[in-house]
Amino acid sequence: MSDIFLSYASEDLERVQILADALENAGWSVWWDRRIPIGQSFDSVIQRELDSARAVVVVWTRDAVISRWV
């Protein structure tokens, strides 16, 4: 279980990496799709992590608004 689940558009990866690092440096555990284990179903991993996270942070950008997955 993570403290924070990050949802974002892949086009914003560089910006989100900075955010994830800052949150982790502040002592929070962060889960985002860069941590999907190899060989596991994307959908089931995402759902499990969403269900167990203490909070969800959505990084709203122009790309995120039109993303099917954000």
Image (cartoon, helix red, strand yellow):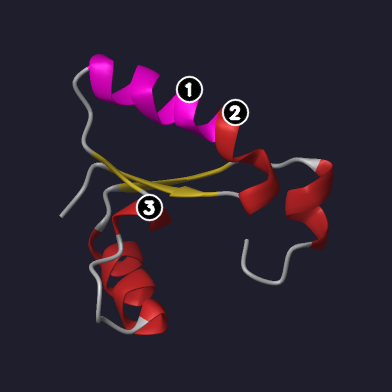
| Residue 49 appears left or right of 32 | left
Q: Which amino acid does label 1 sit on?
A: Ile
List the residue tagged with mark 3: 34
Q: Is residue 5 visible?
A: yes
Secondary structure predominantly adopted by residues drawn in magenta: helix
Residue at left offset 27%, top offset 73%: 48
Q: How far apart are marks 2 and 1 (CA)?
A: 5 Å
Q: Mark 1 points at which residue?
A: 18
Residue 48 belongs to magenta span? no
Identity of the amino acid at label 2?
A: Arg
What segment carries the magenta color? Answer: 16-26
Indicate the position of residue 63 as horizontal and vertical percent values.
79, 50
Circle 3: element type = helix
Q: In the image, is residue 39 above or below residue 31?
A: below
| Disc 1/disc 3 C-alpha distance (Å) | 13 Å
Distance from Cα at disc 3 to Cα at disc 2: 14 Å
